[in-house]
Structure formats: C-alpha cells, structure tokens
Image (cartoon, rainbow, N blue to C red):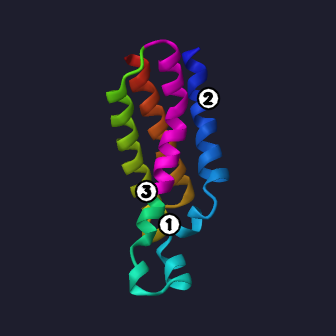
Amino acid sequence: MKEVLLVIMIFCHIVDDYYLQGCLANMKQKKWWKQNAPQELYKYDYIVALIVHSFSWAFMTLLPLMIYMFVNNCFSISFYIISLVINIIIHAVTDNLKANKLTINLITDQSIHLMQILISYFIFYIL
C-alpha cells in the first residue's frame, strides 16, 4: 500500500502545479505586477502569491501521507509540519528561480519538485 502513496503524491503534484494554480501562475511573477499594478505599493505582492501557491502545493502533495498516517494511527504532527515548511520553502525558491530570476527552465523546476516528493516519501517510508 505504501508504494501507491508515491504515485498518488505525484498525481497530486500534477493536479496542484498545473490545474489548481490558476491566477497564481501569473501573480507569482514580478512582471505581471509591473504590468497590472505598477504602483510601489504592490512591488512585493508576488511573494505572497509564491507562498500561497507553495503552501497549496506542499499541502496537496503531502496529503496522501497525512491520510495514510492518520488511518494507520501513526500520524506525527512534528514530521508533518517540518515536511510542510521545508517543502513550502523549496517550492517557493524554485518557482521564483523559474518565474522571476529566469535562471531555471520548466524541466529543472519539475525535476526539483519531483525530488521533493521522492525525499518526503522516502523519509516517511523509513519512519
């Protein structure tokens, strides 16, 4: 059963990173804010969009692990919170490199996200 969790996590990644991102795909880009809200007041609002999307993605990809742990009475809130925070940070930094710094492409971006999933899964698996 645990092996199926990895496939579900990857599916959740695809759903959140491609289908659920919606307007955040634009709003996490500095250039979008410059074009649509050029006032100084909105200069750093892209950061909020990056964090909101990163939270959504991390929550969604870790959800299968959380449900499994809950159902099997082995839920660890500390493991979950630490995993969530680390994945939010890595996802936000990665997306910023792609969307704003323009230093990585989609292949690198997605490779990093898949590595996040694999590492989270294997840490969970060995617990």
Q: Quadrant of the C terminus?
A: top left
The magenta region covers 51-73
Q: Residue 87 location in percent, x, y?
A: 41, 43
Q: Residue 55, relative to residue 104: is it above or below?
A: above
Residue designated by label 1: 28
Task: Say which label, 2 or 1, has the lower sequence index.
Answer: 2
Q: Secondary structure at mark 1?
A: loop
Residue designated by label 3: 51
**Residue type pointed to by label 3:** Ile
Q: Residue 105 location in percent, x, y?
A: 53, 61
Task: Say which label, 2 or 3, has the lower sequence index.
Answer: 2
Q: Residue 109 location in percent, x, y?
A: 50, 53
Depth check: give the residue in front, 4 or 64. Answer: 64
**Residue type pointed to by label 2:** Val
Q: Residue at x 46, y 48 (%)?
A: 55
Q: Residue at x 58, y 69 (%)?
A: 26
Residue designated by label 2: 7
Task: Say which label, 3 or 1, has the lower sequence index.
Answer: 1
Quadrant of the rendered image containing residue 78: top left
The residues bearing labels 2 and 1 have C-alpha atoms spaced at a distance of 27 Å
Q: Is residue 59 magenta?
A: yes
The residues bearing labels 3 and 1 have C-alpha atoms spaced at a distance of 9 Å
Q: Residue 8, relative to residue 71: is it above or below?
A: below
- Which is in the foreground here, disc 2 or disc 1? 1
Q: Secondary structure at mark 3?
A: helix
Question: Left or right of 35: which side holds 77?
Answer: left
Q: Residue at x 47, y 51 (%)?
A: 54
Depth check: give the residue in front, 117 or 83. Answer: 83
**Residue type pointed to by label 1:** Lys
Q: Residue 85 location in percent, x, y?
A: 36, 43
- Bin the neighbour count of mark 3 within 10 Å (Cα to Cα): few under 14, some 14-19, many 20 and up: some
